Each structure stands twice: as structure tokens, then as C-alpha cells.
Amino acid sequence: MSAEWPLKANTKAVGITIRDLEVVYSTGQGQVPAVNGVDLDIAGGQITGIIGESGSGKSTLAMAIMNAVPHPGRIVKGSVVVDGVGNMLTLDKESQRRARGRNLGFVFQAAQNSLNPLTRVGHQVLDLGRSHNVKDLRGLLRRAKELLHRMGMDADRVLTAYQHELSGGMRQRVGIMFALVLDAQVVILDEPTTALDMLSQASVLEIVRSIHEERDITTILITHDMGVVADLADRVVVMYGGELAEEGETAEVLAHPAHPYTKGLIQAIPRISGDLSQAVALSGSPPDLKTFMQSGCLFYDRCPERVAECQVKRPPYESAGPERKVACFRVMPHD
Amino acid sequence: MSLAATTEAPSKNSPGPAGHPSFLKNAWRVIAKKPGRLLGLAIIVLFTLMAIFGPYLYPRQLPINPNAIYAPISWHYPLGTDFEGTSNLALIVTGARYVLFAAAMAAVFTVVFGTALGLISGYYLGWPDSVIMRVTDFILTIPGFPLLVVLSTIWNFGQPMAMGFVLGITGWGGLARAVRSQTLSLRERGFIEAARTLGLSPFHILFKEILPNVGSYIAMNLLLAVTGSIYAEVGLFFLGVVPFQVNNWGVMLNLAVFSAGAMSSTQALPYLLSPLLALLILTLGVVLFLDAVDEMFNPRLKEA
Amino acid sequence: MIEVRRLEKTFPGKHGLLGHDAVKAVQDVSFRIPDGGAVSFIGESGCGKTTIGRILAGLENYTAGEVLVDGQNLATVDRRQREAVLRRVQLIQQDPYQALNPARTIEQALSDPLKVMAKARGADTAWILQRMEEVLGLVGLEPEAVVHKYPHMLSGGQRQRIVIARALTVEPSVLVADEAVSMIDVSLRLGVLKLLRDLREKFHISLIFITHDVASARYVGEDGQMFVIYKGMIAEQGPTDDVILHPQHPYTQALLSAVPVLKGLESPGSDRYIPLKELDHGQSPENACLFAPRCPFAQPLCETERPALQGASGHQYACHYPQERHVVAVALKE
């Protein structure tokens, strides 16, 4: 914590424990399990990257942590226990509302949708403060300014600006400011860099990284870009078709991916050095409505390593070494 | 080197090779989804049949019955009778042709003019746009109903075609403006630019690329134009500014109110209420059916 | 072959083309692409790279300079010829959903340009169907699986393949891919990039690849030329691998630094740096380096004189103080 950073840092990082979470979407063709029986421990003070393609349920999982799954989604069962707050799914409405913003900060996908286009950013900071009964609104604005300045922006200009006057990268930073201005101990970023160019992406990631370190918060990063997770996250969680496929320490997973899907994702990243022929495209389409219905492994149709067993039974999500879990029949534990 | 090496598996949640529903099939699927839409369609079909075949169901001169003047509702006269003892039902059925035919003509004029001019104006911009929009503004400033009243003094509206033409001519301005603004936003879309770089003709771009995307909008306007025109012509006849040479719902209203005193006596009430009921049911049918139009034309909702 | 000389594009502001608020989107850009060759333009959003692509596709006029497609100057050919020339240059847009008409099936989208082609060569309906299957096969799609679908029924990767197939119907010699994979799920991007690379090799279609992602530019055009564009001007240009492995311009180095480092497989380059300041879209002074306000290595000279392209003819950079820095991540030894 440096001298020009007088904000109160959290003394103890907040972890999140998710158990047997199930979220179902009602569609014309019936009930689709977007998140299916997810057990996940998000360690406090770490950056956890949750990666998955469109349709993997990663954004739904993020919304479920806030207990804010949008219609027609519905949390069917499970628990989401946030340290110091309680089970988000059973708290009363008012405590939940207070927890969102105060304890859990959320940065929306392509932040533009989360800003009100009709009022200035500064006004929205004040509105946020009022709805959370912040007494010292002046102090709140000062804090917002510091955060914006910290992210390399002209704070006075941004606070008096409307959403459309800000570029994509700037909006995303404003989104991060909103998530942090009430001193949230957990920040959830949903696709924070999608639609940004590489340079904006890199600077947003740099900001997330440095703020994370300075404030000792818990950061959850939702993305479809393995590169983003590989660069930033301490831990990576791979999601496929609403279920967890693999998790582990980032460097470990990247160097020794166990699940064929994880391997495919890593191989599909074009690199700026080395042999281009090492890059291999992932075949097939992302999971869709039918994927959820098959009885076997969700990744079966696209899997280069599948065996007969994979078609009939869904592999259990099991420990495969220290701090490591995988759902694949082909991975022998401790191999 | 095989280009097909990375074939993506076909997405499974959509129809196979056989599934290429024709427009009508799809439309029926959309309508059948909700009973309200079916009811709406049934009402519209019923009135259309009435307009086409109605006059053939009754003799040219509707029978009069001096013993049943202003007869109450009964099995024999389901909607009562008028001042001559003619069945109100027969009057409604035979009167439907003029009303609906004129309204359909008006709607077709409105839609054809409005759509074509809106598309051209929005796509070409420049001088065609300026000219068309000035004319549109002029049309929009003409108060349609008073114009009709004035015109009727010099023009005989015995033919529904003439009535429909005048209603259509004064009515296309709003649609043209709306279609133009839709076209303006569509022409910047990637697929229109792509069509241009592929060398497709402006005619193709206007009618095959842009038109389907404003289809639901136009269909809705068509239906609303029909009801709007019906109100206008019934209103004209009610006011009595056009000659009474035809069976017509508006004429019935006029006679009921001004001759039969339906406002003060209950005796002629069925005579007043039956054309009103016809209008009400037809409007209800159109409104119920409108619900299906958007879904019918919106490709995103096809085979969801 | 495409040759572009001193291309310039100014968007008029409120006060016209010469007004103080006119935006110079492209300035002094020259390049040539041999048949089957590849050129990539790298830069941030709003740097003018998209405008270059739109000019080549005939969707935008240019203010000055020359554009020659197969030897024909776009400015001097008559309207008819211009249409034919431009048809040989097809644009693959960023958003495949925008690029396909939502109200028309894939079959309709592909048969329209094929009908025009068939008319030109006097071919019949059977030829159209055969070509349709051919182009779909080329982009790796099963014809029966897609032709009767609407765009929204396909995945992002499939949609972009359809857009490429549609471009192939008119037998182009140049494809301009403008951020062609940035809207697609990362997991499916490589498949589309591979397709573009294969089209180059198999049909000698030249590729102009416009992107902010250096890695994907390298993937499709490792053997081609790379142009780093900043505020409408060339900051650095040269053979792709030369620019990536020996970057001289601080802006190129920033772009290379921005490529995520894969923990566990790579370690960051020793000189990696990421500018936190965003690109400002305002006017830059005529006599200063465009990148100076964001450059961590700027000197007083950079504020007073705009650097010209310098360096050996193959690899050039517009910087007063060029210096190679190690910004690219290094692969860890297993």
C-alpha cells in the first residue's frame, strides 16, 4: 500500500464457496441446465479465471454468485457462501442488495450496458452511494476520482462525461471504478476485455492486476479468452456445457493440461513466437441445447481422445493431484 | 492440403435439410401458437368471405317486411331489423363488400406508395430523397378527412375503388417516412455493403435485401391502414356527405341516428348497434392478428 | 496485384475538408501486395486501418494518392470497369452477424452473387448449385447442414465461414479481412485464420489482414509484410517476422507487449511495457511525432519534428530514436 493510496485495505481476503449449484433456463424447448451441479471453492485474495466458450454457463455462474440470474434463468438448488456475508441464495432481499456493491462488485460485459446513458458518470457515483446509504458522499466522489486517476484517466473529465463520450477501454475502467468504489472485497469481471483492442485489453488487465495486489481483494475473471486467463489469473477454472471440466493453478494447467478440452483451448492460441504449426484449431461447435441432453461426457463429439465409455457415462469431477481437479475418464489420478 | 479439414459440426438445434418451411407454413405455425391469433385470423377470414360472397347470399333487393319494422332480436332476425323490416344481418353482410373493398384498396395504395417511396428515398438519398420527402411532407400536411368531405361534394363515391384511391393517396405519408428511416439505418449495415461490393443491382438490394427486413413493419401498417380506412369511410357515410346509393355500415349508422332516433329510443337500438358490432369485431380481429405479424416476418423467431 | 501509393483520406469536419476539425484518417500510406501475398495492418481501434480496408473494397473514397488493382487505377477507370475491378476485392467484415442479412437463408445469400456470375458466363442453375456446394466445401461447411438456415441459427465461426464463402462466389483475387475473427469465440478463431491461410496457398488469393492482434496477423501472413499504423500513418513496416522479432518503434513494442503472456509456457519479455494512457482521437500537431504523447521514451525532439520513415528498404520505422527492445514473451524450456 503506497502513500497516495489512503483507502482502507481489507485485512482478510474473502473466499467464496459454491456447492451443488444448479441454474436452469426455461426455453421453448424445455429446461436447459446452464449451470449443473457446480462445486467450486474460490480462494480469497486470488485471481480466479473462469474460462469457457459461449454457452458454457460461465456468465450464468457469475450472475448466480450475485444471486442475480436474469429471467428466464432460475437457481434451482445449491449454495453460494461468501465469507462474512453468508449464503447469497438464502439471505433476505435487503441484505442481498447491500452485499451487491458493498461486498461483491460486478463489472459487466462490455461495460457500456451498465452505465446509464442519460446521466453523467459522477451523478451515477452519487446515486450508487445514496442507494447504499453512504453518509460521506464527498468522500465517495473523492475515492472515485482517485480510482479513475489510478487507472490513468483524467478523473474530472470522466466524472462529468456521459457514457457516449468515453471509449470502450475507458468505459471498462469506469465499470471497474464502480465495482471498487464501495470497497468491495470481491470483484467479478464478466468478459472485461471482449470488444477491446489488444492495447486497451492489456492496460485493463494491468489495472486489474495492480489493484488486486494493492487491495488484497478476491478477483473473479470470466472470459472466453485463454490468453487473458493465462496472463492474469492465479487459478484457472475451465467450464464446458454448464459443468466444470478442469481447474488448477494457472501455470500448472497451461504447462500440463489434463482435459482434452483444455488442451484444445491452449493449442488454439496463435503465438507471436515459435513454430506456427503447433497451433491447432479446436474442431466442432460450442455446446448448444442438445449438448446438455447427452448422457455421456459433454465434450464427447469434439473430443480427439474419446473412448467408448465416454459416450455412455459422464465422467466425475475428481481430484487429480494437489489443487487440481479434472472431469475426464482418460486422466488417471496421480499420473 | 485439405481445406475441409476443420469442418464444423452442424449445429443440432435447427431443422435438417428437409426443414425449410415455406412462408405460409411458417405463418400457420406462428398463428396456431396462440388461440387469440387463431381467433383474429378467423374473424378476418369471415369478414373477407362476407365481402366476397355476401351479396350473393341475398336477393339484389333485400326483402322488406312492413310487419317487422324495428323487430327485436329473434331467431329469424338475429340482429333485429331496420325501418323497413329488412334484416340487419343481411344489411351488414351485403354492406361489407363496399366497406372492406374500399379499405383494402386504400391499404394497398398506402403500402405500395409508402414502401416504394420510402425505400427509394432512404437508399438513394440525394435529390430523389429531397423530392420524395418534400412531397411526403406535403401529403402529411393534408388533413385527409376534411379533404374527403370536400371531394365528396364534387365526386361521386359510389365506386369503392374511388373511395379507396382517395383514402390511400392521402394516407401513405407516414408509412413512407417510417420506411425511409428504417432503410436509412439498414443501408449502413454490413450486409448491404457486402451486397454492393458483390456487384448486386440496386433493385436487388432494395427489394431482396432491405424489403424483407421491413416486412413486419409494412404488414402491420397494412392491417392498421385497413382499420383506419374503414373508420374514415364509415365516418363519411355517417356524416351523410356521400350519396346513399349503396348498402353500407356507415349509411346504417347515419339512418339509425338521424332518422330512427336510436339515440333516444331503444326500439332502433339493434339497428344502431349492429354496424358498431361489426366494426368492433373486425377491429378486434385485426388487433388479435397483429400479434402474430411480427413473429411471422422476423426470421430470428422462425424455428427458435 | 494491388498497389497503393501515398494514400490519403481526410474526413470532413463541420467546417469542411480544410476545417480545423477535419480528421486525417489515413496519411501517406504506400504498399503493394503480389498475388497470393499477405499484408497485415496492425493498430488500435480508430487508427485508420479499417478505412484503408474500406477504400480498397470501394466502400469509401480517398482524398489523394493512387490505388491500382491489377494495374488499373481506381480513379481513372470508368464506372462499369470500376465495378468489375472492385468485385475482385472482397471485404470480410468484423461482425459476421451484421454482414449477413438476417431475413435471408444461407442459400439465398450465396445464390444472389452466383446468379450474377452465372449470367455473365451464360451458365445455368445447375452451375449455381454446383458452385454453391464448392464454395461451402472450401470454407469447411457441409452444404446440406447450412443452406436452409438463417444466420442466427449458426455459430459465430460458421457465420464468418459463410461470409468468406459468399466472398469466394465472385472469384476475388484479394480478400480484405477487417478484424475478421475478433467477434468470434477465441476457441474458434484459429479455424477461421487457418481457412484464410489455406485460401492464400491454394488459390493465390492475396490477403489484406487488418487487426489489432499481432499473433493472428502472424498466423495468416508470416511470410508477408506487416504495417503498424498509428493515427493513420505508418509507424513501422517490414517483413512480418522481422517486425515482430526486431521491433524498433515504441508503438510496435507496445502492441507486442500487449499480447498476453501464457503463464507456465512463457515468460514476459524483459522490456515489456504497457501504456496506460488511451488513444486520444484529437488532432496531433503537424510537427510532432504522433506517438510522442504516449511514448515512454519521448525526447524533446519528438515534440518538435515528425519523424520520417527510415531504415533499410526492407524494414522501416518512423522514430527519431529507434531501438530494439525485448518485449515478446519467451517460451520456457520444458
Image (cartoon, rainbow, N blue to C red):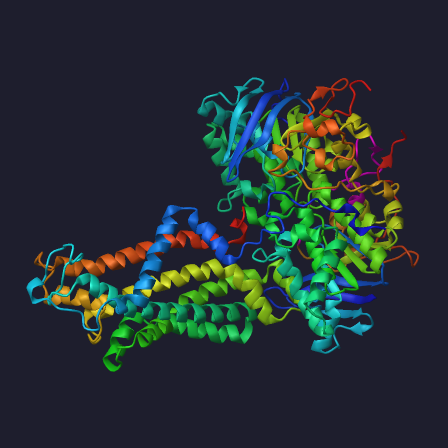
Q: Residue at x 36, y 72 (%)?
A: B170
Could you tell me residue B287's position as x and y percent?
35, 54
Toward the right, the furthest residue is: C312
Query: Foreground residue, A297 or C23?
Result: A297
By secondary structure, the bulk of the magenta-drawn segment is best described as: loop
Residue A51 in picture, x, y percent from top left: 68, 33
Residue C191 spot, x, y in % from top left: 76, 46
Residue C312, compared with residue B154, is above or below; it is above
Q: What's the residue at 38%, 70% (across, down)?
A: B140
Q: Nearer the viewer, residue B108 or C307?
A: B108
Residue C274 falls within the magenta-colored stretch = yes
- Work out whether B39 lies above or below A280: below
User: Quick one: A186 or A25, which is closer to the camera?
Assistant: A25
State the extent of the magenta-drawn residues as a range: C254-281
Q: Nearer the viewer, residue A72 or A308?
A: A308
Q: Quadrant of residue C263?
A: top right
**Image mark count:** 0
Q: Is residue B252 left or right of residue A143?
A: left
**Residue A297 at least partly seen:** yes
Residue C28, by quadrant, is bottom right
- In the rendered view, would you say A75 is above or below A83? below
